[in-house]
């Protein structure tokens, strides 16, 4: 487990509790020495004092739940160490140089990188629609207005209204566009996927998709605990990768 914040602790805790049969939590690493030692002690797993120490445990999978900068530093070393990578900070793949670097490393070391869906819905449909033919995609993020004082305080740094491409939205607000970039990567690409931000409550994510298949509208409306769904999406990736019968 790479990252010992809120989402990382959810993933690590679920693995330590045996929520995925046959998957064992080998160890955790985060930049805060106190937090990583506390998490490792509480969950009864190894504590890596560095990324190299974590990789010396020879994991089959490393789940990243840190941030884009940590992912930039860790992606290639993880693949080189023989582990697949499961990513929550998907927005950084909007950077074509980084994306190409990771793709080349995955091919060189015969590994795979798995982008977790986060809180968005319908990725199987999105991928199938894209394979069927060109698609037009609009991704909308509705959030409480900054002046309202409601919702996650971190969201107040994101404009209340925005209309641009997924790539430009990520370049301007890299901490808030993981889901939009993931939708774009699954469909029309980061420069051809339209992203809207609108004020409103509750926090809601909507993907509107049209193409040869027809039309789809995929909506996720989050409760107060809803953002934690991102951590469970990483566990869903692990479940799919380790199950003999899977969706």
Image: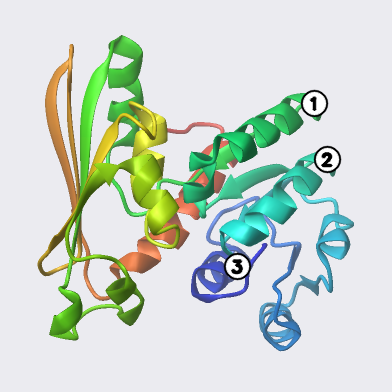
Disc 2, SS:
helix
Question: Which corner quadrant holds the C terminus?
Answer: top left
| Whole-percent x, y for residue 80 in the image | 83, 40
Q: Which mark is residue 80?
A: 2
- Left or right: 9, with 149 as reference point: right
- Left or right: 172, with 16 as reference point: left
Q: Would you name the residue on which mark 3 appears?
A: 12
Mark 1 or 3, which is nearer the eye? 1
In the depicted view, which residue is nearer to us: 103 or 190? Answer: 190
Q: Residues within 10 Å of mark 3 (few under 14, many from 20)?
A: many
Disc 2/disc 3 C-alpha distance (Å): 23 Å
Earlier sequence position, callout 1 versus callout 3: 3
Q: Would you name the residue on which mark 1 appears?
A: 108
- Left or right: 101, with 153 as reference point: right
Q: Residue at x 14, y 68 (%)?
A: 202
Any part of residue 178 in sight: no
| Whole-percent x, y for residue 171 in the image | 43, 51
In the depicted view, which residue is nearer to us: 235 or 208? Answer: 208
Disc 1/disc 2 C-alpha distance (Å): 8 Å
């Amino acid at each position: 487990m790479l990252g010992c914040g809120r989402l990382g602790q959810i993933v690590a805790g679920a693995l330590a509790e045996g929520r995925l049969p046959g998957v064992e939590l080998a160890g955790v690493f985060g930049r805060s020495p106190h937090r990583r030692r506390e998490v490792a002690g509480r969950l009864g797993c190894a504590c890596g004092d560095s990324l190299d120490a974590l990789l010396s445990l020879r994991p089959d999978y490393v789940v990243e739940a840190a941030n884009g900068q940590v992912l930039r530093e860790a992606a290639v070393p993880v693949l080189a160490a023989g582990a697949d990578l499961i990513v929550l900070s998907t927005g950084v793949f909007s950077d074509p140089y980084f994306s190409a670097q990771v793709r080349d490393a995955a091919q060189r070391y015969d590994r795979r990188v798995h982008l977790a869906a986060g809180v968005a819905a319908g990725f199987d449909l999105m991928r199938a629609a894209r394979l069927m033919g060109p698609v037009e995609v609009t991704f909308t993020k509705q959030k409480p207005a900054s002046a309202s004082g409601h919702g996650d305080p971190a969201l107040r740094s994101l404009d209340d209204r925005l209309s641009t491409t997924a790539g430009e939205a990520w370049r301007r607000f890299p901490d808030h566009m993981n889901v939009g970039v993931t939708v774009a990567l699954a469909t029309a690409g980061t420069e051809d996927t339209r992203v809207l931000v609108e004020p409103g409550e509750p926090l809601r994510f909507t993907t509107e998709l049209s193409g040869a298949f027809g039309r789809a509208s995929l909506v996720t409306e989050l409760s107060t605990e809803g953002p934690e769904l991102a951590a469970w999406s990483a566990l869903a990736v692990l479940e799919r990768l380790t199950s003999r019968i899977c969706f």
